[in-house]
Amino acid sequence: MNSVTFRNDTLTRERMQQIIAAHPRAAVFESCVFDGGDFSRLDMDGFQFNQCSLAGTSWLAASLEESRWHKCRGAQADLSSALLSDSHFSHCDLNNSHWRRATLSSVRFEDCKLTGAHLQEVSGWALEFRHCLMVSADLRGLSFRKAQLDGMDFSDAELSGCDFRDAVFNGGSLRNAQTRLTRIDGADLRGTDISGLNVMDSKHFKKAVISQQQAAAALAAFGLIVA
């Protein structure tokens, strides 16, 4: 089916329902405004959103599998319980967005701002993040096991119960992150900033790899002097 492009439109729920009926899986939205709209529980699989404004929108329990989002601005958007498998977000501003219980299998986030985002209890596998800002985000229980974490900023993030076992950090930061019961066994932390890391249960850092400089800083945080 050929795609149909909508440009510079302001989208309401009623308008979106009309588009879904006429162009299932084939709609492309460019520079459109969705701000404050309620698109919950609609079937928008395969839709594409380019440079759209999504501030304060609700996509609660919507079906958005295989959707594409590029350079969108979605502060405080609510994607709780949404079905998003095989979707791709690139260069999006999604600060303070909500994703609780969303299905994120094979979802890829690249160069996205997710500061203050809430991703508790999300489900799925092969979730991928690259060069994203996760500052102060709530990621409790999320699995990054064996992930290649390039340029990820987890500063001040809530990482309690997360699984970073055997992950490799290239750049980015874990500065002042909360790590209660976080599994970091075997992770390579040499490429990231771990200053101020709140290590509340050090046994879960078994065999994690850090540099000599990082080791000295970690010991200094416990009041020890490396001579």
Image (tube, rainbow, N blue to C red):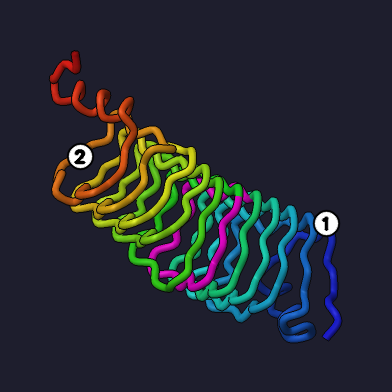
Does the magenta segment cover residue 108? yes
Q: Quadrant of residue 31?
A: bottom right
The answer to which of 76 and 115 lies nearer the viewer is 115
Q: Which residues are magenta?
A: 92-110
**Which kind of residue does numbered mark 1 sit on?**
Asn
* Left or right relative to 165: residue 193: right
Provide the major secondary structure of the magenta segment.
Answer: loop
Give coordinates of residue 96: x percent, y percent. 47, 48
Does dot 2 land on a helix, a strand or a loop?
loop
Residue beneath the point at 27% across and 46% down = 208
**24 vs 27: above or below:** below
- Residue 62, given in percent of the width and then of the height, sits at 54, 75
Task: Say which mark, if any, is on residue 199.
Answer: 2
Query: Closer to the N terminus: mark 2 or mark 1?
Result: 1
Is 23 displayed left or right of 157 in the figure? right
Residue at point 74%, 58% (across, down)? 50
Viewer-closest of 158 and 127? 127
